[in-house]
Structures are given as C-alpha cells and as structure tokens.
Amino acid sequence: MTPDKTLAVYCWAPHIQAEGVNAVLDDLQQAGVNAVSTTMYVAEPTAPGPDARREPPEDGGRGMRRIVDRPLWGKQEQFLRVGPSFEHNRSLFDSGRVYSPPEPNDLTGKQGHIVAEFISEAKRRGMTTYMQISPSGRPPVRADTTEQQLDSETPRLPDGSAPGERMVSFPPLASPELQGYNAAIVTDVLTNYPDLDGLLLDRMEQSVYSFDDAFIDFGIHAERFARDNGFDFEALRTAAQSAIDGLQTLENSDLANMGSRSDGTPLLADSLGNSPGLSELLKFRSSIAESYLAKLRASADAVRSGVQLVPITFPPPLSLLTGVNFSDYSSSANAVMIKFFTMHWPLIVTYWTESITRANPSLDSGLVARAVSVLFDMEDEPSANLADYVFPGPDDAHRAGTNAQARKITQAMKEAGSMPILPSVHAYGPVDDVERRWRIGWETGESGMWVNRYGYLSKEKLELLRRVTS
C-alpha cells in the first residue's frame, strides 16, 4: 500500500461486540487498513418490532434483499435493540427545546465500554481513529416538545407544503435546534473519547435522495438564515417554484434528445448555470451547510486543537444540489469523504422518476429515468426502462458506470484543490463487482479510500482489499 494513502474502514459497533475488539482489528491490519471509525451506540439481538433496528438498514423500505457478509450474532439479517455507548452530559443540551440525547440503558453499562476499548486499541496499534456522527439526521425528540416546535423542524417546499416521500426524513439543516444539538454532541463525544483523532460528519449537506429534497428548505429557519446572511428569500422561493412548475411543460421529446455526456462535462452544472435564480439557490444551500460546518469546527476546537473533521457528502454532480462546495469546506474540514453507496443510486433514479411523472403524467417513465441517470452521471450506459433501476441483491453487480464513478472522483478533486478527497466505496455486492468499484476508488483517488463497512468484509473480501491496495 502507498505509505501516505489512507485505507480506512467503518466498523459498526455491534460487529465489534459480536467478534471482539482484537479479532476485528487483527483482520483489518492484515488487510493493510490504517484508519477506522465506529459509532457511539451498542446493541444486542431482539425480536422484530417498531423499536428494533434492522441490520442491514432497510434503505427507505426498498433494500430488503440486502444482507451482511459477516453474520452478526449468527445471522445475516438481524433485528437489534440499541443503547448509547456512554452517558451523555445532559447539561450540554439544556439550552435546546426540541432535541435531547438518548437516555442510557442497560446496554450502556453492559456493553458501552467496548467502543472506548476499540478506539484505544486501534490507537495503540498506530491507526487513526474516528467517531461517526450524523449532523443532518433527526435526533431524539424531547418528551415535552410541542406540536408547534415539531412543525418548525419540518422542512418546507417553496409553496410551504411538507415534502412527499423521502428515503430519509431529515430535519431542516438551518435549524438552530439541530445545529446546537450536534455542536453539543461534538463536545460530548470528544470529551468522552480522548483517543479520537477526528469525527466523520455523515451527510454534512442537504439531502437529494428524492426530487422534493432538491427543493427544500423554505421553512422558518431557512428564512431567518437568508435574512441574516443577505439572501433574497422570496427570490429564492420564486426560482425554486418556477423550476418545479417547469415540469408541466416538459415533453418526452425533450427527454429523448438528452444525450449522454461521455466526455464528463457536468451536464447538471450547465443546466443550473443557465438560471441565475437557481445558481443563487445553490449558493444559499451551500452557505447553510458551510455555516453549520464552521459551528462544529468551533465546538471541536473548544475541546482540543487538532481534531480532524471529515464531512461525508454526495459526489459531483449531486453535490451541486446538496450544497457542497468542496473548496470552501477546506476552511473547516481536513478532508471530504464522498459516498459511493452505489446500491442507492437506482433508488435515487426511482424516487426522482416517480415524483416527476406524478407531476407530469404525460411523460414516459423510462425516458425520465434515463434522463435522471444522465443528469447525475450515474452510468456509462443508462437505461430507458424504469424497471432496471432497482436495489441490487447481494449477488447483483451495481449499475454505476466505471467511467462515471472515476469522473466523479476526478471532479471532486479538481473542485477541492489541495484538500484531500476520500471516496467511500461500499463493500456490499458480489466480489468481482466490489473489486471493480474498489479499484476505481483506490486508483482514481490520490489520498486514499474508505470502505463501508466491516460487516460486508468476508475473509475473501478482506484478502481482496489487501490485493487491490497493495
């Protein structure tokens, strides 16, 4: 392995619990891994139910065929009861009105210590250590939260309505409640785990899984941010609504004429650049994300200097819609991880196609699906059949194009300048396709690669990882 490149693996804590700290780290070191991350909660098997968490995740209810390669407590699909890995300092969260950290339970006392042991042992072995948190995820809601407060934590479309079907129900990124909660989480985590080198900030951006995600947020928090930062909120609202209304005039011939940009020219950037209103809307989204990231940087620096912050984002050109400006992130971040969770990409095509065809039923769903894939540069050979865009099973190759993936990494590095870009390539899927995707991530990227996650790293894939990166 190239000495100055990162080879990192995300290790979900339940797999560490099930297999043991040293067993997991032995496997990873033998594969050449030099950095790891984990989570701030632990788990145990339980029966299916509303409070149970499924491993692997359901992915918006559309990924139920997915299983893990490494059985978790004897099963490749497991329902889990979870608990925090440490007892939160609740005084850090006293100023919040909506969100509060999870209460400790019996798992905290019985199993929580394993997370600290994993981080300390990885550090002792010379690995760089990270904890993953979710700045855009919805935290636990306080029991006394009012309906009015909850309503303010719902993102809004430009007409004031709530978004429709979404893969993940993110709160408004501009919410002071959300930002304050996660600033406190940064303080709490770094205080409790002094051996951490850094934090991974999962989805440090607006979402774009669904069509509606691309046109939020126009709620009260976003309006306040616009006013405080010199944006014309009504003009932004008008531009967004005009783009949505434009679907009514879209015709099948427009979609049929959309060619594939095999030279890597960012078609989405060209389209957005022709609309000053949409360009300003994207600057607005970026400004929210960058301001939030700066608050998390300040929170980390207040605990100790030198803590690495690594935002996790969508790759280009999806990043244009989510509000990621790779160059501007460098003022607060040490690197940016771009997610190549390519089993999700067909779901994005499906979600967008369903929304667009609902708004304009005259459109051919196959042509819409192909246009979405082309617009987001997801494939080398996009399909005009919506039925092709399904969540891949464990033995199915991912549709993501080899050249398309390489273009995304190259574009992100170009935009980031000197800041490292780290592709995060998922280990889910058949071995030959995993090898294809790992080679793209490792050989195209200059700074290294993250692998998500340990639960998909069978012995065969661990050996493959060593070969690919050696």
Image (tube, rainbow, N blue to C red):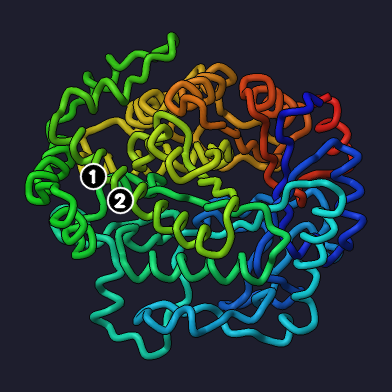
Q: Amino acid at mark 2?
A: Ile
Rounded to the nearest angstrom, the CA distance separating label 1 from label 2 is: 6 Å
Q: Is residue 228 above or below residue 235?
A: below
Element under label 1?
Answer: helix
Give me the residue at 72% from left, 72% from top: 43
Q: Amino acid at mark 1?
A: Phe
Residue that numbered label 1 is attached to: 284
**Position of the N terminus by quadrant:** top right
Q: Quadrant of residue 447?
A: top right
Mark 2 and mark 1 in contact (Cβ < 8 Å)?
yes
Element under label 2?
Answer: helix
- Which mark, by number, is residue 362? none
Q: Is residue 293 above or below residue 32?
A: below
On screen, residue 401 versus residue 386, left or right, reads right
Q: Position of residue 59 (x, y in %)?
A: 54, 54
Is residue 82 in view from this perspective?
A: no
Among all residues in the image, which is located at the extreme bottom? 144
Residue that numbered label 2 is attached to: 288
Q: Quadrant of residue 13?
A: bottom right
Towards the viewer: 341 or 442: 442
Q: Quadrant of residue 88?
A: bottom right
Give me the residue at 38% from left, 45% from top: 208
Give me the residue at 61% from left, 58% from top: 57
Neighbourhood count class around disc 2 (C-alpha, 10 Å): few under 14, some 14–19, many 20 upward: many
Neighbourhood count class around disc 1 (C-alpha, 10 Å): few under 14, some 14–19, many 20 upward: many
Give me the residue at 57% from left, 55% from top: 305
Q: Is residue 224 above or below residue 364?
A: below
**Position of the C terminus by quadrant:** top right
Q: Position of residue 340 (x, y in %)?
A: 57, 36
Q: How many marks?
A: 2
